[in-house]
C-alpha cells in the first residue's frame, strides 16, 4: 500500500467511521513497510511515499484525536532496533587478558600463582604446568551449542553484552554446525578467535580494489569488517577461520585440564592452534615463546604474543578472575614494532576532561602492517623530555591496539632552523586559560562546558559503546547538534523526540533516519547503573571501575548518597570507597571533584531524577544485577580478612568470598559484617570488637560458606 493507492478523501471531509478504517489500514501498512525496511533491508516503497503515509496518518489523528490507536505509528519511534545486530548478554562474561611485556612479567605471573595457591606456596617443588599458545590477532567469538547443535554465535562486545552474529558465523568452515564425536555437555559455549589468513587478506584486498571497494588496513580489520556484514552472503565470500581456545557457559564441567579440553575441542570438530604446547614450567613457556617468535614472520596469520594458561582447571577456578581478566592466564606480548618518519606538525586536542593532549601528525609510514599517520605525545612534559620538535625525524612504535607512540627523536636528522615546541597556555578551541594543577601531568582547559571540545567530547563519551551505546549517533552528528543547540547536555539527548521534525528536516536527514536515531535513543531510556556511571565520564573512572562502583553500591541513589558523603576524607564513606580493591585515594579525589561541581549534579538530576525517590529525570537507571550467587550465605555481605590463614592464602580467600557475592574490604568499619581473623590478628580484631562486628575463625568462616 502506498499513499497513491489509497482513495484519498481530503482529511477534513472524512467521517469518523472512514477515519477509523483508514487509521487501521495505515497502521498495518506502515508496520509492513517498517519491517521490510528495518528487518529485511528491502523496502518496497520510496522514502517519500513512506513519509506521505506517515503524514496522512498524523493529519487524520490530529482531526480525530479520540481515534488514535494504541499502537499507532505516530507513537512508535521506528519499530525494531535500528538496523543492525541484536544484542546478546553473555551467560559468562568474555574477559580480556592481562599482559606481560617481558620475561620478568612472566616470572612474576608464575610467582604470583605460587603465592596464591597455598599448597604451591608450601611446597616449591610442585611444578606449575601451563598451556602456551599463540595469541591470535583477530576477534573473539562465543559459539553456543545446545545438544550438540550450533544455536547462537556472538561477538565479545563489551564483555558482558555482544552482538548476535549467528548467521555470519555459520558461514565459517572451521565452525561445526553439529558437534562430532561424543561427550559434550548439553549446553556448551566454545570461545575462540575469528581471523583471516594473510594470503586470504591480500587476495581480498586485490578483489576489493579491482571492484573499487574499500581496502582493509590489516587482516584483523578485514576479519572484523567481514564478520560485521549485515548480509551473511557477503561474509560467506570472505575466507574467515576460527581457532577454539576457551569456553563460556557449560551445563556440566569438562573433565581434565586445559590441555585435555583442547583435545576434546578437536574431537568435537574444532580447529585448535597447532603450535599450542603443554609446558612444565616457566622456563618451558619462555622457550616456547622464543620458538613462536622465531616463526612469527612465516606463519600465515597474524599473532601478537603467546598466551599462557594454568593447565589445572581447579587452580584456574581457585585463582578466579577480576572484572577485567582471569588471574590464571597472561598474554606475553611481542615487543612493539618501530619505524622512522617525519613529524610534520604537533596538534593539540582537547579531551572531555579538558586535558590538552599533543598529537604528532606524521608523514604516513607502515609499522607492523598498519599505516600510521598520527601518534600520541602524551603531555607537555613528555614533549620537553624528549625535546620533540616540528620537522623532526622521529622513531615511532606501535603495539597491538595501543595508540602509536613517539619513542625518540633522531637528533642527527634535525633541521638546522628548528626550535623547541611551545606548549600553549590557552585552549586552542575556546581560548580559555589552560592551567596545570600541582602534581598533574595534564594542562587543562578551564572553559568547562562552554568549551566546544569538552562539551562535545563528553557527549561523545556518553553515547559511546561502553556507555549508552546509542547506535548511529556518531561524532559528526553530535558536533552538529551541539553547534545548532539541539543538545547541550546529556539529558537533551532524551528530549530530542520532541524535536523529531526539526531533525528530519535537517540536511542529510529525513523522516526515516530521524526515526532511527530516536528509536536508538528510546532503546536506552533504561540503563544499568554500571553503564550510567561510566557514561558520566568521571576522570579515571573507566568501564571496570564503574562496574566496581555499581557492584558495591548497587543503586544510583545509594551510590550518589555515599559519594556525597565520601567527599569528607576523614569520614567512613571515604574509607569504604578506598577500601574497594581497585579504587585508590587519587580516584576517590577525582570522584569527589566530580560531585563537587554543580553542573555535574545537575546533569545527574536531569537524567535520573532526584534522590527523594521522586523520579523527575529522563531515564530509569536499573540497580546493578549482582551475579547469580543465590543461596550464598555471604552474598552482599562485607568481609575483612586479617591475621594468618591456614588453609588458603589471603588472595584466594578474597577471590572465593567475591565469587560468592561478598565484598572484601581492607579495613573494619560499622559496615563490616564479618571479620575473619587468623592467628596474629591485631588492631582490626580490636576495632571489630569495639564496633560489635562478628569475628570468625578461619574454620567458622569455612563452615559458614560451606567449603570446609
Ligand atoms: S584465552 C578468559 N587464548 O586476546 C580469556 N585469548 O587480549 C581467555 N586471544 O579477549 C582468552 N588468542 O580475544 C586466549 N590463544 C588465545 C588467544 C586469545 C587471542 C584474544 C582474546 C582475548 C584477547 C585479550
Image (cartoon, rainbow, N blue to C red):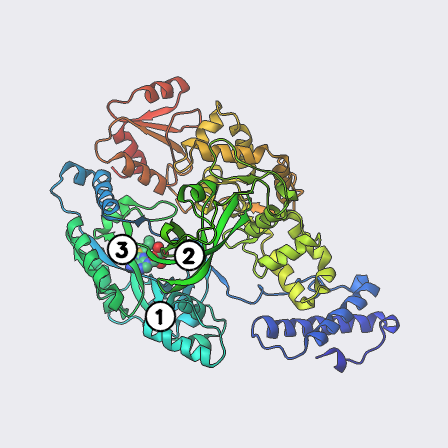
Q: Is residue 107 above or below residue 59?
A: above
Q: Please indicate whether residue 44 sits to the left or right of residue 98 in the image.
A: right
Q: Find disc 3 in the rendering and name its residue.
A: 307
Q: Please indicate whether residue 466 sits to the left or right of residue 116 in the image.
A: right
Residue sitting farthest toward the left: 125
Residue 196 is labelled as 1
Residue at disc 3, CB closer than 8 Å to ligand 1: yes
Judge the density around disc 2: few (<14), some (14-19), many (≥20) Cα neighbours within 10 Å: many
Separation (CA) of disc 2 from disc 3: 23 Å
Q: Find disc 2 in the rendering and name its residue.
A: 90
The number of callouts visible is: 3
Find out whether the residues at labels 2 and 3 contact each other: C-beta distance under 8 Å.
Answer: no
* Quarter containing the N terminus: bottom right
Q: For residue 505, what is the image quadrant?
A: bottom right
Residue drawn where x is 58% and y is 59% of the image: 474
Residue sitting farthest toward the right: 13
Amino acid at each position: 500500500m502506498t499513499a497513491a493507492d489509497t482513495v484519498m478523501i481530503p482529511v477534513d471531509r472524512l467521517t469518523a467511521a472512514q477515519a477509523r478504517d483508514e487509521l487501521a489500514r495505515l497502521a498495518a501498512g506502515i508496520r509492513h513497510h517498517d519491517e521490510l525496511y528495518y528487518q529485511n533491508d528491502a523496502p518496497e516503497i520510496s522514502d517519500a511515499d513512506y513519509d506521505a503515509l506517515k503524514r496522512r496518518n498524523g493529519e487524520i489523528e490530529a482531526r480525530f484525536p479520540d481515534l488514535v490507536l494504541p499502537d499507532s505509528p505516530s507513537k512508535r519511534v521506528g519499530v525494531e532496533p535500528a538496523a543492525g545486530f541484536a544484542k546478546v548478554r553473555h551467560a559468562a562474561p568474555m574477559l580480556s587478558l592481562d599482559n606481560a611485556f617481558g620475561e620478568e612479567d612472566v616470572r612474576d605471573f608464575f610467582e604470583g600463582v605460587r603465592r596464591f595457591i597455598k599448597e604451591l606456596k608450601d611446597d616449591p617443588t610442585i611444578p606449575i604446568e601451563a598451556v602456551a599458545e599463540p595469541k591470535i590477532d583477530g576477534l573473539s567469538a562465543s559459539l553456543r551449542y545446545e545438544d550438540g547443535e550450533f544455536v547462537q554465535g556472538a561477538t565479545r562486545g563489551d564483555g558482558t553484552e555482544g552482538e548476535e552474529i549467528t548467521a555470519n558465523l555459520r558461514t565459517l568452515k572451521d565452525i561445526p554446525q553439529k558437534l562430532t564425536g561424543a561427550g559434550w555437555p548439553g549446553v556448551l559455549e566454545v570461545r575462540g578467535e575469528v581471523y583471516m589468513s594473510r594470503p586470504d587478506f591480500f587476495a581480498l584486498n586485490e578483489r576489493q580494489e579491482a571492484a573499487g571497494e574499500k581496502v582493509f588496513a590489516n587482516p584483523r580489520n578485514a576479519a572484523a569488517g567481514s564478520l560485521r556484514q549485515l548480509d551473511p552472503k557477503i561474509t560467506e565470500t570472505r575466507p574467515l577461520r576460527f581457532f577454539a581456545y576457551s569456553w563460556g557457559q557449560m551445563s556440566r564441567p569438562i573433565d581434565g585440564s586445559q590441555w585435555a579440553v583442547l583435545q576434546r575441542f578437536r574431537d568435537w570438530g574444532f580447529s585448535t592452534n597447532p603450535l599450542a604446547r603443554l609446558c612444565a614450567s616457566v622456563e618451558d613457556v619462555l622457550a616456547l615463546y622464543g620458538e613462536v617468535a622465531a616463526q612469527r614472520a612465516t606463519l600465515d596469520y597474524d599473532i601478537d604474543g603467546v598466551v599462557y594458561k594454568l593447565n589445572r582447571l581447579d587452580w584456574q577456578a581457585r585463582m578466579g578472575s577480576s572484572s577485567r581478566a582471569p588471574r590464571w592466564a597472561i598474554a606475553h606480548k611481542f615487543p612493539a614494532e618501530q619505524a622512522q618518519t617525519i613529524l610534520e606538525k604537533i596538534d593539540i586536542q582537547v579531551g572531555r576532561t579538558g586535558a590538552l593532549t599533543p598529537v604528532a601528525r606524521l608523514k604516513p609510514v607502515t609499522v607492523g602492517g598498519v599505516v600510521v599517520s598520527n601518534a600520541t605525545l602524551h603531555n607537555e612534559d613528555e614533549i620537553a623530555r624528549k625535546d620533540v620538535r616540528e620537522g623532526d625525524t622521529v622513531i615511532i612504535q606501535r603495539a597491538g591496539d595501543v595508540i602509536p607512540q613517539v619513542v625518540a627523536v633522531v637528533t642527527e636528522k634535525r633541521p638546522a632552523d628548528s626550535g623547541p615546541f611551545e606548549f600553549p597556555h590557552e585552549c586552542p578551541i575556546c581560548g580559555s586559560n589552560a592551567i596545570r594543577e600541582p602534581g598533574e601531568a595534564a594542562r587543562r582547559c578551564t572553559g568547562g562546558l562552554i568549551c566546544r571540545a569538552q562539551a562535545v567530547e563528553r557527549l561523545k563519551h556518553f553515547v559511546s559503546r561502553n556507555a549508552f551505546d546509542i547506535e548511529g549517533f556518531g561524532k559528526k552528528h553530535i558536533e552538529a547538534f551541539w553547534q545548532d543547540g539541539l543538545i547541550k547536555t546529556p539529558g537533551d539527548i532524551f528530549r530530542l523526540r520532541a524535536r523529531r521534525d526539526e531533525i528530519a528536516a535537517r540536511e542529510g536527514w529525513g523522516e526515516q533516519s530521524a526515526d532511527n536515531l530516536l528509536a536508538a535513543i528510546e532503546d536506552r531510556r533504561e540503563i544499568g547503573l554500571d553503564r550510567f556511571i561510566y557514561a558520566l565520564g568521571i576522570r579515571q573512572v573507566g568501564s571496570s571501575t564503574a562496574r566496581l562502583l555499581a557492584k558495591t553500591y548497587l543503586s544510583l541513589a545509594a551510590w550518589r548518597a555515599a559519594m556525597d558523603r565520601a567527599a569528607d576524607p576523614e569520614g567512613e564513606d571515604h574509607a569504604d570507597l578506598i577500601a574497594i580493591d581497585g579504587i585508590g585515594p587519587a580516584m576517590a579525589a577525582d570522584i569527589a571533584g566530580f560531585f563537587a561541581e554543580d553542573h555535574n549534579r545537575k546533569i545527574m538530576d536531569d537524567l535520573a531524577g532526584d534522590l527523594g525517590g521522586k523520579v523527575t529525570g529522563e531515564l530509569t537507571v536499573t540497580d546493578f544485577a549482582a551475579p547469580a550467587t543465590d543461596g550464598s550465605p555471604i552474598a552482599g555481605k562485607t568481609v575483612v580478612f586479617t591475621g594468618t590463614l591456614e588453609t588458603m592464602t589471603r588472595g584466594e580467600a578474597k577471590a572465593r568470598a567475591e565469587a560468592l557475592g561478598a565484598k572484601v574490604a581492607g579495613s573494619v568499619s560499622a559496615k563490616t559484617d564479618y571479620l575473619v581473623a587468623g592467628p596474629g590478628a591485631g588492631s582490626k580484631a580490636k576495632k571489630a570488637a569495639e564496633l560489635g562486628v562478628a569475628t570468625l575463625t578461619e574454620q567458622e568462616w569455612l563452615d559458614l560458606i560451606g567449603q570446609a
